[in-house]
Image (cartoon, rainbow, N blue to C red):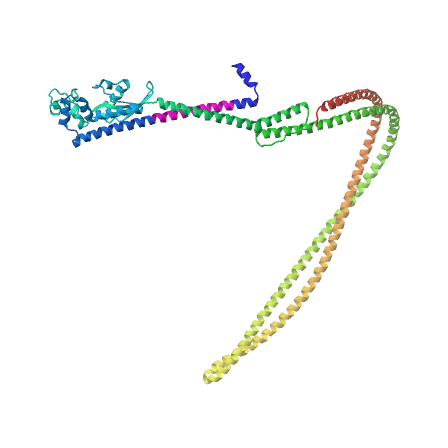
Amino acid sequence: MMQLVHWYRSRSLRSKLISLVSLQLICLGLGFMWMFRSVVQSDARQDAADQSRQIIDLAESVRTRVAHNWRTGIYTQEQVAGWAQAGETERVLSSLPIMAAREILSERALTSGYSFKLPHLNPRNPDNTPDEVEVKVLKRFSNSASAEDYYEFDTAMNAIRYFRPIHLTEDCMICHGDAKNSQKYWGNAEGIDGTGFPMDNLAIGASYGAYEVIQSMDRADAKVAQATLRGFGMVGVAIIVSCAVLAWLLNKSLLNPLRNASLAFSRLVAGDLKHEIVVESNDEVGQLQAGINTMTQRMRAMIQSFRSNSDELGKVSTSLGQTADSVGMAAMNTSTRSQSVSTAAEEMSQSLQSIRTSLSTVSSTVQEVAAASCQVMSNAENVAINTERSARIAQDAEALAADGGQRIKQLESAANGIGDIISVIKDIAEQTNLLALNATIEASRAGEAGKGFAVVAAEVKQLAGQTAEATREIRRRIESIQTISQQVVDAIREIATVVESVSRCTSETSHAVSEQKETITKVTRQLAAAAEITRTVASGVDETVLAAQEVSLSIHEVNAIAEKTSQEVELTKAAGSNVRRVSEHFSEQLDAFAV
């Protein structure tokens, strides 16, 4: 078994796929042929059963026809009894319905390839003695009055055995009825029928044996075998054609693309990154080929990047050697110049002592100036406060002037409204005067009856005249008020202009004082900062003196470090040489890839 597995694993993919698919097709073909043979065989057996049913139907037709002959008088009881008494048993049997049917079907069976029997549990004819199958079927029919046709396949005989129960009719009673009627039917008192057998004492409808047709399946099986053989041939041709088509499809869609992918991988292993696969499909194999192309492109880019990095590494190693040489020269210069730095540090310490004394004097002077600036800033703050207060008063006066002008405008508007009302009153007085005149005219027309009305009309006319005069006086006074109001408005407008100018000047003064305050504040702050810086510088000078002394002490350490740096430079040059060798070896390795 392990050898078979090893052999299978050593086969090519094409052989594996074709063998597996061929095996599946063969199994499918065998299954199909088995099902086909089963169906054909089942149909053949069903056809045999149908033919057997037709044969038994023919027997029933013959039986019915002979019974009809009895009813129509073709056969009579006296005639058949005479044949029996004369010993003509064959003529008697041919006149009985069931026996006539048996005789006809038995003759047809000789040429039609089937066997016909009338099995019975107690047969009169030994040829009708039942076997095991027939006994089983006869008992089934005798136990069930409603039993119908039954058939089964007898494997021992390779035949279909079809059965139909025989039920006695009135025509059957002359042989199978009550034995007491033997004298009536056959002219004897022994209970013997016309065939020489005792009567069975059975009633109409009783089960009496069965029809049986035995259809051999030998010829049908031969046809089934022939059809199966033709089917195997067709299936075999279909399998061969399917395998050929499968092999072509496998070569075109799977094996050739996989072979191209395998060659591409071989080229990748060999370092050839120049070639790519031509992708001809979008299936899984096409995706694999596209993935190989992507991997090739990325490897090509990576190798190119490696080469670039290798070149850069070589340049860096060369630069490292040059830098090491420069550092060595710098170390030597450092050792030489450290002596000069030591001398300069001592001189700088002496100079810083003098600077420290001068800075102390400057710091005192700056502090005095800062104190004076603080006093100036305090005075400027007072001026700013008073200026802001004047500005607010001017703004309030400007607001009051604007409000007064607004109120005078409202008074002028009210006076205009009163003038409108006076005009209305004047119109009413004129209308009243006209009405009084009309009333006087009407009163004069009325005579004595209108005298009282005329007096009232005269009074109304007089009141209308007084009203008109009062109205004119009010209009004159209102016009005088409007003139004075306009003069007041003009005066308030001039006051507002003056107040606005005062407010603007006050604001400018306040702004200038604020700027001076800010300037003084900045100067004070800067003087304080200068004093602080002076103190800081003085402190820094002290620290610088100490630092100069420390520098002088550290020069010897610088000399030692310079010597150690020279040693490290030699080691760095050696490391640069190693880096150059590694870079050259890396470049040689990358040259194995063709990009």
Tell me which corner region of the image, top left, top right, bottom left or bottom right, holds residue 286: top right
Quadrant where the C terminus sits is top right
User: Residue 459: percent from the left, percent from the top?
Assistant: 52, 79
User: Residue 46: percent from the left, percent from the top?
Assistant: 34, 27
Residue found 58% across the figure and 71% down from its top:
422
Range drawn in magenta: 20-46
Count of residue discs? 0
User: Residue 580: percent from the left, percent from the top?
Assistant: 77, 22
**Front residue of 334 and 269:** 269
Is 45 within the magenta? yes
Relative placement, left or right, of 179 versus 143 is: left
Relative placement, left or right, of 192 versus 416 is: left
Residue found 50% across the figure and 23% down from its top:
22
Tell me which corner region of the image, top left, top right, bottom left or bottom right, holds residue 579: top right
Is 362 within the magenta? no
**Front residue of 334 and 111:** 111
**Front residue of 227 and 306:** 227
User: Residue 592: percent from the left, percent from the top?
Assistant: 71, 23
Residue found 73% across the figure and 57% down from its top:
501
State whether the magenta stretch is mostly helix, strand or loop: helix
Relative placement, left or right, of 407 versus 138 is: right
